[in-house]
Amino acid sequence: MKPTKLMKHGFAILVTVAGVTLSGATLQADGQTKSNAKVASSRQGSRDPFKKYEPPQIVLKKNSTLAQVPSIQQRIEEYKVQKLVAMNARVAAPKPTTAFLLSEVQVVGISRTPRGYAAIVEATPIKLAYVIYPGERFYDGQLVAIEDNRLVFRRETVYSDGKRDRSIELKPLRQASAVDALSAAAAKAPAQSSEPEVEKKSEKPAPEKP
């Protein structure tokens, strides 16, 4: 009986050892298969040494361009529509300066008013002047501050992809041109020519009283 039991126990142990060995071999085979697959995939992703080298294609990002600005006539028509809508809604209408670009405006003068500093600017496309204060909006910017001899604007640049950049722009007082100087001199000339006549008249003797 004892040898039979020993044989049964030994057979069971052998079966267990064989099962463990078989499972270990299976796991090792699976690991080798996965590692071989990784190596194969890495080899597929790598460059073939027998193929002519081709540099990778570099995709350049397209530079965003400036958004197209409507013409002055289109902007004026848009302003008229906005003004009409505001009047019908009984709200404050936009200022005419909202139709002009900062590049289309020249600073004619700066003065001090009860409201503070004010500036007189000329819209060069239509040759009209406007009085503006800090906070005044333009088509592509806004007046931030008025200094003694210049205006400070915040410019807004819009690109075709919707991106917006903001920067500071300074506009000095417009220098008097030669035409302005000649017109000022012509205005002074009659006043100066009338002075000698007054002096001559004063030199004449007063008529004797009867």
Image (tube, helix red, strand yellow):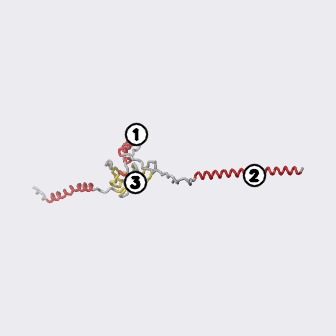
Residue 2 placed where, x, y %?
89, 51
* SS at circle 3: strand
Tell me the crowding category of disc 1: few under 14, some 14 to 19, or many 20 or more residues within 10 angstroms, Cα based: few
At 42% from the left and 48% from the top, the residue drawn is 67
- The image shows residue 200, relative to residue 84, as above or below, that is below
Judge by depth and name the residue closer to the eye, 83 or 40: 40
At 39% from the left and 48% from the top, the residue drawn is 139
Q: Is residue 123 left or right of residue 184?
A: right
Q: Is residue 84 left or right of residue 193?
A: right
At 82% from the left and 50% from the top, the residue drawn is 11
Q: Nearer the viewer, mark 1 or mark 3?
A: 3
Q: Quadrant of residue 86?
A: top left
Q: Which residue carries the number 2 mark?
A: 21
Q: Which residue carries the number 1 mark?
A: 88
Residue 64 placed where, x, y %?
45, 50
* SS at circle 2: helix
Tell me the crowding category of disc 2: few under 14, some 14 to 19, or many 20 or more residues within 10 angstroms, Cα based: few
Of callouts 3 and 2, the N-terminal one: 2
Q: Nearer the viewer, mark 2 or mark 1?
A: 2
